[in-house]
Image: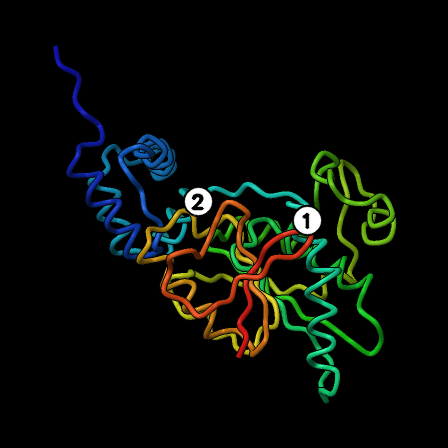
Amino acid sequence: MVEAVFFTDTDFERYRSLIYDESGIHFTATNRSILESRLKERLRGKGLDSPQKYFKMITTDKEELKKFLDSITTNLTRFFRNQPQFDTLEKFVVPELLKIKKNTSSPVLKIWSAGCSTGEEPYSIAMLMNTILPYPWKYEIMASDISLKCLMSGKEGFYADNHLEGIPEAYIYKYFDRMSGGYKVKPEIMSKVRFDYHNLKNDSGLRDMDIVFCRNVIIYFDEVAQTRVIKRFWDSMASKSFLFIGHSESLFGMDTDFEFVKTPWATLYRKFI
């Protein structure tokens, strides 16, 4: 007896087309098994027995569609991930911005952590900014993600003991409160980070950002979607601002006006107009 195929080629094409249209995330045949596994989890949760029934559900229920997109994203992160980029932020980017904006009437650095996952990245940035920015400079951080579950975790600001790897000991003492089973980010840092849902497929509405972090996100998009996302970052950024992407990602060959910048610590991109 031949076993029925749970997820047909037609199903796969319908799902990956919908995912691409809604998020820009590009599923290939090689990672089809990941999509199928996440889909089975959603079907079990909804009490459904076929991909066809669930497809009908997510094309009529926007909230369930958000939850589905949440389930297929990979949320691998940690505090101070890729330390050389944080060295670049501290030793090059911030000094450059303070020189550029030294006569501003509003001494505030506006930072966007796009694809913030569970909050380790924006909180890392906040701790560093809190430590190095001279008076009267202030900072604001927008943290966005497509995963509602991750955003809720970030807003809570609680991290188990094993999630604090990479944080300087002095920072743990200064910026966290010890709690049962882990640590909670102190209110002074939490108040600097605003978490909000955002799909990179759409315009964020943000403007005049001085620093944008979008690391290990565009790698999941195809070339067309990558170009669109980078163009939206350009539109959201101030003149003479800086963009960090993942160390394995590149804008090489892409139709963009960003300038490549190499520092002694890491590479990044600059909007220099």
Q: Amino acid at mark 1?
A: Pro
Crowding at dot 2, Cα within 10 Å, few <14 / some 14-19 / many 20+, comes out as some
- Of labels 2 and 1, earlier in sequence is 2
Q: Quadrant of the N terminus?
A: top left
Q: Amino acid at mark 2?
A: Thr
Instruction: Find residue 209 and report its horizontal and vertical position in percent.
Output: 58, 73
Residue behind mark 1: 84
Q: Measured along the vertical axis of the image, is residue 40 above or below residue 233?
A: above
Residue 130 in the figure: left or right of residue 193: right
Q: Farthest residue in the left direction? A: 1
Instruction: Find residue 69 and report its horizontal and vertical position in percent.
Output: 38, 49
Quarter where residue 263 is shown? bottom right
Q: Nearer the viewer, mark 2 or mark 1?
A: 1
Distance in Å between CA atoms under marks 2 and 1: 26 Å
- In-front residue for pair 50/75: 75
Q: Measured along the vertical axis of the image, is residue 90 above or below residue 17?
A: below
Q: Secondary structure at mark 1?
A: helix
Q: Farthest residue in the top direction? A: 1
Instruction: Find residue 93 and report its horizontal and vertical position in percent.
Output: 68, 65
Identify which residue is drawn at 49% across, 73% down: 236
- In-front residue for pair 148/216: 216
- In-front residue for pair 188/84: 84
Identify which residue is drawn at 40% across, 42% down: 72
Q: Secondary structure at mark 2?
A: loop
Residue 37 in the figure: left or right of residue 9: right
Crowding at dot 1, Cα within 10 Å, few <14 / some 14-19 / many 20+, comes out as some
Identify which residue is drawn at 52% across, 77% down: 207
Instruction: Find residue 79 and report its horizontal and vertical position in percent.
Output: 68, 46
Residue behind mark 2: 73
